[in-house]
Amino acid sequence: MATGEWTRSPNGDWTGGFFVGQLWLAAATGNGPVETARTWTERVRPRAASDTIFRGFLFWYGAAIGYRLTGDEYAKKAALEGAYALAESFHPAAGLLPLGSTAEEAHSVGADETNIDGVPGGAPLLYWAADLTGDESLRLKARSHVARHLELLVREDDSVVQSASFDANTGALIKTYTHKGIRDDSTWARAQAWAMLGTAQAARYEPDAFTADAVRVCDWWCDHLPEGKVAYWDFDAPQHEPEPLLDTSATAIAAAALLKMRTVNPARADEYERTARDMVAAMVEHHLSPPSADGPPAGILGDACYNHRIQLATKNELVWGTYFLLESLLTLTGQLATHEL
Ligand code: GLY
């Protein structure tokens, strides 16, 4: 936050697509050259071979949205490669795309696990590829992936838990838990936000199957959002501390999801837009560094919490938060229609 210098993850880890996605957003709005975005999609492409559910994030944001926004053929080719490689990892017994052996978090739990963070990105990538190629097996995998996550991870009160272990032979649920929340029965802000985004993306392709779920996980968020309109890093984190930790990255994901909900559930479009606008305004007014001659560079979205458990980057800018704030700002200012992203 202080200097604006980024800490980078080797090979882009699960986050690399969000930087590339920003370059595609810039290209689509005349704020940057397509060639630059394409060069970075080239760097994402070899990751098709990585055994991780987060190929969904890498190839949706790092390639597919580039094609959707600009018609770039290279981005389309890379995105299809990522989609087909990801679909290969489908676990028939569990009916979903599991975490995978090289996913962030697999090192502590193994590969036959699943995370709600694997639904956004992964689901639209397979649906989009199914539409483009006519390959219905991709659509079936996407549908099952989303439905199983909702079944395993959305609680009765519509809050969301991050992760589940399943029996590798039968696919039966063993337990639910969290890698990054405060407790297994708490609601980690990004679990709720990723669920909102993933179900909003899936509902655009299959409204009958997923609109009701998208509405309920979004309602939970809106009903529990603190007065300041920026979420705590975990909704159950102690809130009596003098300065409770926030997560602007979760808030930005949720704002982007609510803006997509305007087309998923048009009857409540105004309400979704109002809440998203309030959240975006709170982030911009209180958590974005302003232009200044001698301060930090302008436009740093601070106060995002990566991993409170290991005290890593608990009050920092996180690249996906910046992506979703940019996507939301371009949407709210009428510069880009993002309901298909
Ligand atoms: N693993 C995704 C996240 O930390 O939000």
Image (cartoon, grey):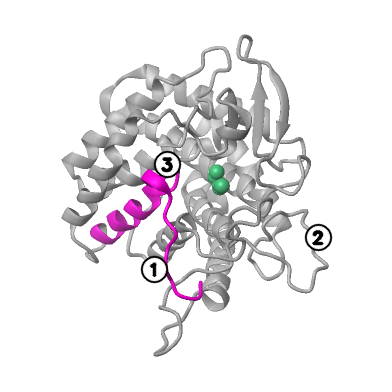
Dot label at residue 14: none
Q: Crowding at label 3, few (<14), some or many (≥20) Cα neighbours within 10 Å?
A: many
Position above or below: 168 against 53: above
Q: What is the x, y in percent for residue 93?
A: 57, 12
| Label 3 with label 2: CB-CB less than 8 Å | no
Q: In the figure, is residue 57 to the left or right of 188?
A: left
Question: Who comes first in sequence, dot 1 or dot 3?
Answer: 3
Q: Crowding at label 1, few (<14), some or many (≥20) Cα neighbours within 10 Å?
A: few
Residue that mark 2 sits on: 238
Quick check: is the Cβ at mark 3 less than 8 Å away from ligand 1? no
Residue that mark 1 sits on: 333
The amino acid at mark 3 is Phe
Per the image, is 13 magenta?
A: yes
Q: Which residue corresponds to the image point at 54% horizontal and 69% vertical from the top-left? A: 302
- Which region is colored magenta? 1-27
Q: Is residue 130 visible?
A: no
Q: What is the x, y in percent for residue 8?
A: 42, 55
Q: In the figure, is residue 7 to the left or right of 312?
A: left
Outermost residue to the right: 240
The amino acid at mark 2 is Pro
Question: Label 1, label 3: how many angstroms apart (C-alpha)?
Answer: 25 Å
Q: In the figure, is residue 327 to the left or right of 115?
A: left
| Label 1 with label 2: CB-CB less than 8 Å | no
Position above or below: 335 against 320: below
Q: What is the x, y in percent for residue 190?
A: 61, 49
Q: Which residue corresponds to the image point at 56% horizontal and 37% vertical from the top-left? A: 211
Query: Splitting the image into 4 quarters, where does residue 30 fall?
Result: bottom left
Q: Which residue corresponds to the image point at 62% horizontal and 37% vertical from the top-left? A: 213
Residue that mark 3 sits on: 57
Q: What is the x, y in percent for residue 85?
A: 35, 25
Q: Secondary structure at mark 1?
A: loop
Question: Label 1, label 2: how many angstroms apart (C-alpha)?
Answer: 35 Å
